[in-house]
Structures are given as C-alpha cells and as structure tokens.
Image: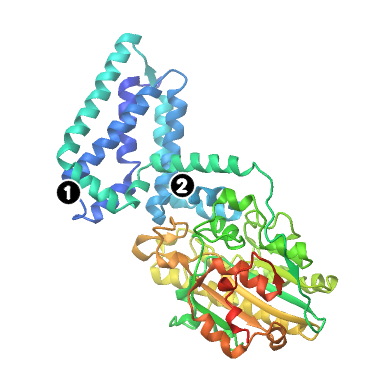
Amino acid sequence: MTLRRPCVRSTWLALALTLFLALVGNLRLWTVLAAEPHAVSWAARLALALALVAGFDLLLQAAALPFVFKPVAVLLLLFTAVTSFFMLNDGVLIDEAMVRNVFETDAGEAGELVTPRAIAFVTLTGLLPALLLVFTRVRYGPLRSELTLRALVVLGTVVLAAGAAWPAYKELSFALRGNQALKLMVNPVSPLLAVLHFGRDEGASEQGELQPVAADARWEAAGDGRRRLVIFVLGETATASHFSLNGYARETNPELARLDVLNFPEVRSSGTATSDSVPCMFSSLAREEFTREGGRRQENLLDVLQRVGVGVLWRDNNSGCKGVCERVPYEEVSGPPEFFDGHGFFDEALLSGLQEFVDRHPGDLFIVLHQKGSHGPAYSRRSPPAWKRFLPECTKADVQDCAREEIVNAYDNTILYTDRVLAQVIRFLQANSPGSLVAMLYVSDHGESLGENGIYLHGFPYWLAPDEQTHVPMVFWASDDFLAARGLRRDALPALAARPCSHDNLFHSVLGLFGISTTAYDAGLDVFADACP
C-alpha cells in the first residue's frame, strides 16, 4: 500500500497553523490567565485569543507562498515549541537579555537544559506538527481566487477579533498596562522581537573605537613597599537569602563565620543574568546608564588597573568573561583529577597553580576567579560529595520533577561549597600575607529562583525580577596590614557594610583599595571610603 499524502489548500493550512500557534504556542499565557480567574473576564480572554488569531493569520496568509510557506512554518513551529517550553517549565520571560544569555552560554550549561522533558515537549508541540506539515501537499488555487479567499479569511478573523474586543477593550487594555509581563508571554512574537533586537545591538556594538576611562589615573604604591594582592571572587547565581551570614536558618557559611569577614547584607545586582551583570559591574557606568553597546565601546575596571601598572588575571570556571577580560591575561580553569567530576571542574580548581602565578608577578595583583558557583539547573553537579550536607538533594536537570525541598537542598549544598571555596581563598591570601598586603572581595553576579511563585532559574527582565534574582551576597576580608596601609579602620567597616549598595560600587571601591587617583573615582560609591580616618 502507498501512503497517500493529504492535500490542503494553502489558505486553510495557514489558518490551521494560525490557530495552533495562538492556542498551543501560547500555553504559558493561557495558563497564567487561567490561574488568575479574577484578573480578566472570559470575554477579555476571548478577545485576546481572537486578536492573536487575527494578527497571526494576517502574517501567515501573506507568507503562504510556494517555496516559502513550508520553511517559514517549520521554523516557526520549532522556535515556538522551544520558547514555549522554557516559558512554561521555568517560568521565564524571553526578552533581549535572555536571548543574549542563551547565545553567550557555553556548551556544558546549554546541555543541562536539554532534558527528557524538554525533548518530549518540543517533539510533541514542534517537531511532529512540523513533520506533518512537510508531509502535507499544499495546493494553491488560481491567483485571483486565492487572493479573494485569503482576503475573506483575514477579514473574517479581523471582524471576529474586533467584535470581541469592542466590549472588552477597556478591561483588556487596563490589564495589559497593569501587567506588562503578559506582553512578554505572547509567543512567538515577543521572543522573535527579542532575537531581532539582540542581532541589531550586537551589530551596532562592533562599530566604534574603544573609549578610554580614567585616562588621568595615577597609582600610589603601598607605603611600606609591599605589593597589594587582591582576589576578586565573582560568584555565580548565589542569592543573599540563602547565606547564613544574612540570617538564613541553615548554616551555609560555617567557615566564613569563623574568619572575621565583613558581610554586606543589602546588595543589589546590576542584572539577572551573567551576560548583563558582569559587563555592567566592571564598568564605570551605573546600571541605569549602562547599555551593552556603550559598555563595549569603553574601557572597564580591568583596563584601568592594567594601564596604571597593576597585574591582572582572569581565571574562569564558567562561560567566559562576557567581553570584560578581552585585553587582559585569561586562563581557563584546570586542576588535579579530584576536582573534576566528568562534567567540569569544581570551583576549588580555581586555586590550582595560582601560587605559581603570584610568585612570577612581584607587583600589585588583581585576580578575578569566576566561579561555576550555584549555576542551575544541575545544582547537584556544583558541589563535591564531601559537601553534600543537605539531603536528599535533587539530582535531575528537570528540577521541576523534584520536590522543592530537594531542590533547595541541592542549591544550599552549592552555597555551602562556595563557603568552602571562599575560606580556601582567604587561607591562600593568609599564606601570602608576610610579603604582601592581601584582601578578598566576593560578590555574586545575580541570584536564583527556586520555584517561588512558579519561577525557576534566573534571567527575568530586571524590572519584573523577583528579589531572589537581584538580592545577592557580598563578602570582604582583608589582613590588618592591608587595612592599615589604606588607612581603613576595621571598627568602622561594619556600619558601612550595613548600608544598601550594589554592583555600581565595585568600580570605585576597587580603585580605592589600590589607591588609584583619578577624576573618574567617586568616593560616594566607594563602600570603604568612610572608614578612612
């Protein structure tokens, strides 16, 4: 027997695809509205659904051309299925920042998102409909009758949408203005616009010369001739509320609590994803002023330090420096086998061989250690077996398949291990303190959602982001002679640390720690400035 391929007129096939995208492709939107029965009336929901149908139908009828329709439709189905999965599964909203985060992640992190649940969902809602579409023969009528039929179909969907929207317009417009997140749930329109904006901004950022920052900077050597050695630990996906230093019920910072560190309980990130936070925090620009294009066109903190004579090293155990370290020495993490679990290195490997680097560079040093930290969704891979104190923990990449207690256990184990890593950094600095003035500063790039209000992971638009994604931990430690050389009074520091601050303070605080004088320095943004006598 020969399997007969169905034959469908192009107009009706475009309408079927329209209905599929508007209904199945927007499951997140309809799920959110269904979960809030009093948000809008059923009449307003019907009006919104018909408006999507009318808009999609207008575009797809125009694209229903020979040799064009099937490729466009297949790509739309697959793209919509992927974006719909992450909107539904992780509660994310896809804007330009989220698209940038996807493009700048590494293969290991991307692979953790390709789970059995993701494969099944994309297959069911994207791949199978696309294969059915490819198998179907598309029939095109004579030009005049084809255009007439399409015009009538489009007119019909528009009239239906207008008829439903007229009585519900006031309610619907009020709901959309009051809940901007709903607009970001319109799939695939919002994700496609985000991709286009990302491409436009990436193209624009390649143009223009690098602008100097703090061109008048002057470096003041320490008074006793010893070099300054500052290690900046760039944390990953740690949220302040899970640090016991900030009052969390579980003891996730036992080692730091014994090491006389200065804890900053009220710190805000400059973004909710590494690709946004990291370039912004190293920039001289405040979060409100920072743009991706502007940040790439000017020097950052590392450039200023290196230009005045401070040795700089970026050592990475994550997905790169997001352009920040392009002009300074860079190393990928490596280490002994006990720090490797088959997927990647644990963060203690960041210290492997670091002493040799320090010994080869006798001058002032600023070393960045970029952690893997608490990056999800595979939290269980971020901590070695010896540091799994909170059990049972979730071992699945599909964290939604785990009980929330197991998700929190796995995440808290990563915080406990970060405590271990930071303590090791401090001990490393203590071992170097006889010949160097030593200090460590730690701050996470952003936080993480663990299922609160149905939201997982990170990358939410900043203006909508929950506290878990923007409230980050920050810790400082310094030897007594480092503080004395900078004229900092240890007894004055706790009061300063209690004040609210953010990633905006990093640029100016590090300049202050190294005694770098420049008109670009703002003492009001140096978190340590008021500790000087």
Residue positioned most to the bottom:
491
Judge left or right: residue 74 versus residue 25: right
Residue 490 x, y percent position in the rendering: 61, 88
Tag 2: residue type? Ile
Identified at 63% across, 71% down, the residue is 233
Q: Of the numbered discs in the image, which one, if any, rests on residue 119? A: 2
Identified at 56% across, 65% down, the residue is 236
Residue positioned most to the left:
167
- The answer to which image quadrant residue 382 occupies is bottom right
The image shows residue 158, relative to residue 273, as above or below, that is: above
Q: Name the residue under label 1.
A: 41
Asked which colour scheme the image uses, the reply is rainbow
Does residue 188 show up? no
In whole angstroms, how far apart are the C-alphas of marks 2 and 1?
35 Å
Residue 167 x, y percent position in the rendering: 14, 40
Quarter that holds the C terminus:
bottom right
Judge left or right: residue 311 versus residue 458: right
